[in-house]
Image (spheres, rainbow, N blue to C red):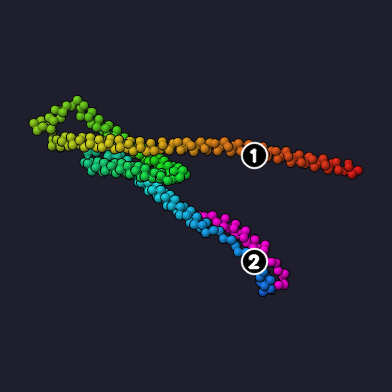
Amino acid sequence: MATRSRTLLFLQYRNSYARAQSSAPHFSAGASETEGLIESSDHVIEMSVLPPQWTDIVEEIDEALDAIKDKSNVKKKKKARAINSLILKSITIVTRLKGMHRKHLLPGFDDRSSDEAAIEALTTEITNEFYRIKRDIQRIGVGKNASNQESVITRNIQTSLATKVQEVSSSFRKIQSSYLQKMQGQENKKVNILGSNLSNEAAELLLDEDAQIGFTESQLAVLESSEHNIDQREKEINQIAKSIHQLAEIFRDLQTLVLDQGTVLDRIDYNIEQTNIQVKEAVVQLDKVYYSHILFAYYLISIRELNIKVKPESVS
């Protein structure tokens, strides 16, 4: 909210009013209002001095500049609030994805292609949200004509938002890595159960019509669907690895942004330390002044007591 000081104008009004009061004639208590006006006709009534017109123009310009600054700050605050809402949305989606991972890793023989598609879509959505947040944070950049104070505030906003995104993206990367490791562990268990020394030719023989003697139709269906499941699982693992790589790039960019602000934070810490030292020195000086006042007061009391003792002797 833009404000302007009216102290100078008030002081001018007060001083001019005081001069007018001192130059006005004083009337007796019995004089009428008409007599007072007639008698004072020879006196010049001093009008209150108004400030020059350019002061109003300067104030209007200051108000306009303050309004422009306020609009710029409001836009940045709106962007920051929008980014915060996106971060909260990402946290909610990541939590939901974690539950879907837990459900998908449960043992079972049902067709889970729909679950895998939902996980892949949600993973892509989260990755896109992180890219969008990163772009929005970079768009809050400091303007060319910004003051030093505004630049520091803008950089602090960027650092705060980048730190929040780093925390959420780090959590998402851990969830993805854990899910990838568990899926690979399930694949290794399946290989151990089927036999790690099973060659490709032997696997093809299992599906050959001439080598299907001794297998029921349900067993053959399981063998045929297993190959599709393996391909689907491999595709899903590759997709997870890709999302982890993309998150690593986002994390690295945000980390660079935070490190760039480290010098500003170091300067702030240094100024705080120097202020603390100066305050402690000021306290020491105040203590010295306090004790010197006490000694001076004690000295005055002693002199006064001596004077009181000397006066009766001189009188006698």
- Residue 44 is tagged as 2
- Residue that lies at the very extreme toward the top in this rendered image: 197
* Residue 121 point in image, percent of width and height: 26, 43
Q: Residue at x 14, y 35 (%)?
A: 220
| Badge 1 density bin: few <14, some 14–19, many ≥20, Cα 10 Å | few
Task: Specify whether 200 is left or right of 148.
Answer: left
Task: Look at the numbered discs 2 and 1 and tell me whether their residues touch, using CB distance below 8 Å.
Answer: no
Which is more toward the observer, 225 or 241? Answer: 241
Q: Nearer the viewer, mark 2 or mark 1?
A: 2
| Badge 2 density bin: few <14, some 14–19, many ≥20, Cα 10 Å | few
Q: Residue at x 45, y 42 (%)?
A: 152
Name the residue type under label 1: Leu
Q: Residue at x 66, y 67 (%)?
A: 43
Does 158 lie within the magenta span? no
* Residue 34 point in image, percent of width and height: 67, 74
Whether residue 45 is visible? yes
Give the vertical position of 203 relative to 151 (above or below). Answer: above
Please count the marks in the image.
2
- Residue 313 is tagged as none
Q: What segment is highlighted magenta in the picture?
A: 3-31
Give the vertical position of 3 relative to 159 (above or below). Answer: below
- Residue 286 is tagged as 1
Which is more toward the observer, 147 or 45? Answer: 45
Does 25 lie within the magenta span? yes
Give residue 217's quadrant in the image. Answer: top left
Which is more toward the observer, 118 or 309? Answer: 309
Name the residue type under label 2: Val
* Residue 189 point in image, percent of width and height: 25, 30
